[in-house]
Image (cartoon, rainbow, N blue to C red):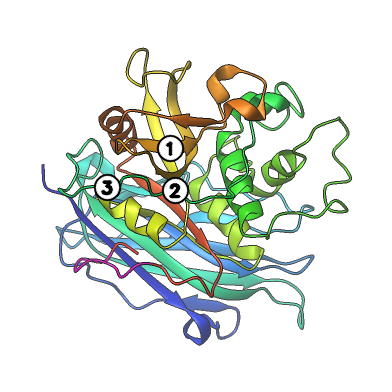
Amino acid sequence: MSTDIRWTGWAGTQIVPEAGVWTSSEVSPGFCFDELVASWNVVTPPGTWVEVAAQVVAESGERSGWLVLARWSSDPAFASTSVAGQDDPVAVASDDTILGRDGRRFTQFSLRLSLHGPAGSQPRASLLGAIVSADARDSAPAPGAVPRGTVVGGVPAYSQQLHRDRYPHWDGGGQSWCSAASTAMIADFWGAGPTAAETAWVDYETPDPQVPFTVREVYDESFGGAGNWAFNTAYAGARGLVAYVTRLRSFAEAARFLEAGIPLVLAVSHQAGELTGAGYVTNGHLLVLTGFDEGGDPIVHDPASHRIVSDAEVRATYDLGELDRAWARSGRIVYVIRPPDVVPPEPPAQPNW
């Protein structure tokens, strides 16, 4: 099955809105796509928020309306949310993803960023972009070898199990907080995580208060969880990092980020017996890729920690083929999160970062 993937982003002065709204040009990625996931990096002063919307054009020429993907702020007083139930005949906004209604595919897209807040205290945007893809889910990996023995050191290990049943109004508690725990690991790795003063509101004893803090920051009220992909990267972007959601074609592409010193968050899904040693099954899970062992198998920081309540159980090594099949179920979604001065690898001819 062929897979087409293209990331298109705008940065810096290109996305300074006029009158509080910026609309991108219409983008033709060069293939018909079936999914779109947007990303944004915005600093939102207290009392301000942004709306991110996308419009797509179907192969038939039908144009969707503007579908809202997020009403978002890093201000904890604001309830960030995707928007469910948007009734459009062409496309569907499904939490963090635009999909075709009744199997439609698209040839073009546009993004719109709207800033909201009092005069003189508007949000400041530094990145807006989207990954579009065709036939990415359950596709075969692109050819390429991984570098054996390549490991990014210093990534902290946070188990979501340490937070079981805590703050159950956020998706039932820590047993569901894999995405936020993974994002917290990466933010702390880059020195951009919350301070002790910022986490002082956490009201139970834990070595990793960064995890519930991140949950609060990335929680999607409509989705009812902390696993909205774009909300996680938006949180990291609001803390001064460059962060976005994209899709990769293989672990060989992922390895290029590790060689540049950039760990990645991977979205996976697997059932009983499909990921040896995991100790759990999942219809959707996030974990951190930190490297490859001498045999070429991926080394991860898995916040599920085999369902064991211990940060010491977070580091794991999984079979390359098994983890790739689990990753392929999401279309090989990753969070790319890095400081502005850390240079990413050169993208491929059909760029996906």
Asked if residue 346 lies left or right of residue 21, the reply is left
Residue 12, placed above or below residue 209: below
| Residue 160 point in image, percent of width and height | 64, 30
Is residue 90 found inside the magenta-colored segment of the image?
A: no
Task: Write down the quadrant of residue 236 in the picture.
Answer: bottom right
**Which secondary structure, mark 2?**
loop
| Residue corresponding to mark 1 | 299
| SS category of the residue bearing label 3 | loop
Tell me if mark 1 has few (under 14), some (14-19) or many (20+) residues whose alpha carbon lies within 10 angstroms of its own: many
Q: Is residue 348 magenta?
A: yes
Q: CA distance from mark 2 to mark 3?
A: 11 Å
For disc 3, the marked residue is: 146
Q: How many marks?
A: 3
- What amino acid is labelled 1 in the image? Ile
Q: Are marks 3 and 1 in contact (CB under 8 Å)?
A: no
Badge 3 density bin: few <14, some 14–19, many ≥20, Cα 10 Å: many
State the residue position of label 2: 151
Residues in magenta, as a range: 345-351
Q: Position of residue 43 (x, y in %)?
A: 66, 69
Q: Amino acid at mark 2?
A: Val
Q: Residue at x 74, y 38 (%)?
A: 208
Q: Mark 3 to mark 1: distance in Å?
A: 12 Å
Percent from the top left, x then y, of residue 24?
Answer: 40, 76
Q: Residue at x 28, y 72 (%)?
A: 27
